[in-house]
Amino acid sequence: GNVSSCSPLLRRVSYREDNSGGNTKSQSRDEQFAPLFGIASNSKNDDVDSVLPTKITRTPKKNRKRTNLKISVAYRGLGFCGWEDQRHELYRNANVNGNSNNTDNGNQPLPSVQGSLADILGPVIGNSPTITKPIEIKVAGRTDRGVSAIGQVCRVRTWNDIPDVEAYIQELVNNEAAAKNLGLRITDVKRVGPEFHPSFGATSRSYVYLIDLEDDSDDEESSRITRDLQPELDRMLRELEGKELDYFALSHGKIKTETTLCTLYHSRVSIVEYTGGGDHKRQALCFELVGNRFLRRMVRLLLGTALREAYRRGGDGSLKHILLSKDRRERSR
């Protein structure tokens, strides 16, 4: 796609910068966080005015060639129950009985990202124009309710002959998502080989966690999170960078992976401020993590434990000490 600059949503500020302005730290150079910090990003068809093609050829399977598509998706997590499509009997019963948290304020079930994509793409790339079975969508990693994405990678396959299929898919999803007021947008579509798998082929995954420094709730824990914790949090997380370590102590549940060894390539904490909203710039602690793999609940357990150790003034090596203990009792709950 064409390279274009995007407006930053966040900017880093110095720990000692006052509210009147002053010098700021350089913006992130990490491609993974480009949409957040306003670096040039790859995107095409940002403004779609073309007419969608109407001719889709469905030929006998023996004469067809399968097309594999890598799709990059961005979405706002508050409008979804998570990535995974949960429209099965247990999900419906839970909502009927009022036992599910996956609802909006009107007690209507929230859609999933996977389900929303399947509903839009199914009639087009599936074997039939009427949906009888959800299409298969493979993804690099599932996200929970409320978690947003700026570069979620997934894969779909189709036997149908669709002219200019990359532009077609992107335009179709973006138009329908906008019409349905879904916080969902495809940022890129590429043809890939049959061997491509978004999860098994991923070389790294990236996460950003923001903790509001101006939270006005009465929660005691929130009131303890202040900008003064940033220097110590940053030192603790940088201590983990570039090292292959066993993260069993910061995992949850039964281990289903071959190994609990993980490497964090980038592990930082900074203070950022939202660039919109007028004169008042709302600030947050920004945790940036890039690693080769992440275990179940590893990110939230890592952040929670780091905050606890910062409260206790545990020192730069406290997180590493907990990892080396391989004892889940040593971590934050």
Image (spheres, rainbow, N blue to C red):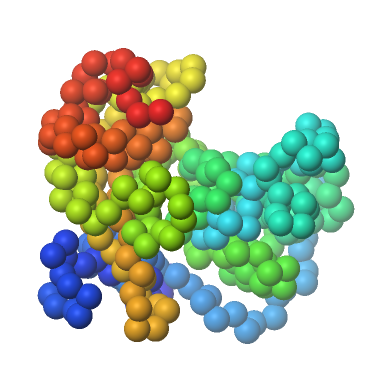
- The one nearer the camera, 235 or 17, is 17
At x 45% / y 30%, what residue is drawn? 296
Residue 158 or residue 298, whichever sits in front: 298
- In the rendered picture of this protein, how many numbered marks are placed on residues? 0
Is residue 153 found left or right of 212 in the rendered image?
right
The picture places residue 309, in percent across and down from the top left corner, at 23, 34
Q: Is residue 38 left or right of residue 227?
A: right
Asked whether residue 116 appears in the rendered view, the answer is: yes
Is residue 64 shown left or right of residue 191?
Answer: right
Q: x and y percent of residue 15 in the render? A: 16, 61
In the image, residue 21 sits, relative to residue 241, either above or below, namely below
Picture residue at 35% right of the left edge, 37% below the top? 304
Residue 263 x %, y %: 26, 33
- Horizontal relation, residue 295 to residue 314: left or right: right
- Quadrant of the rendering where the N terminus is positioned: bottom left
Q: Is residue 240 above or below residue 187?
A: above
Residue 226 vs 14, above or below: the answer is above
User: Is residue 165 something that shows in the picture?
Assistant: no
Q: Position of residue 320 (x, y in %)?
A: 19, 27
Query: What residue appears at the point 35 percent right and 83 percent down from the top-left corner?
Result: 279
Give the quadrant of residue 325.
top left
Q: Nearer the viewer, residue 272 or 202?
A: 272
Of the 4 image quadrants, the one containing the C terminus is top left
* Residue at x 72%, y 39% (from the top left corner): 100
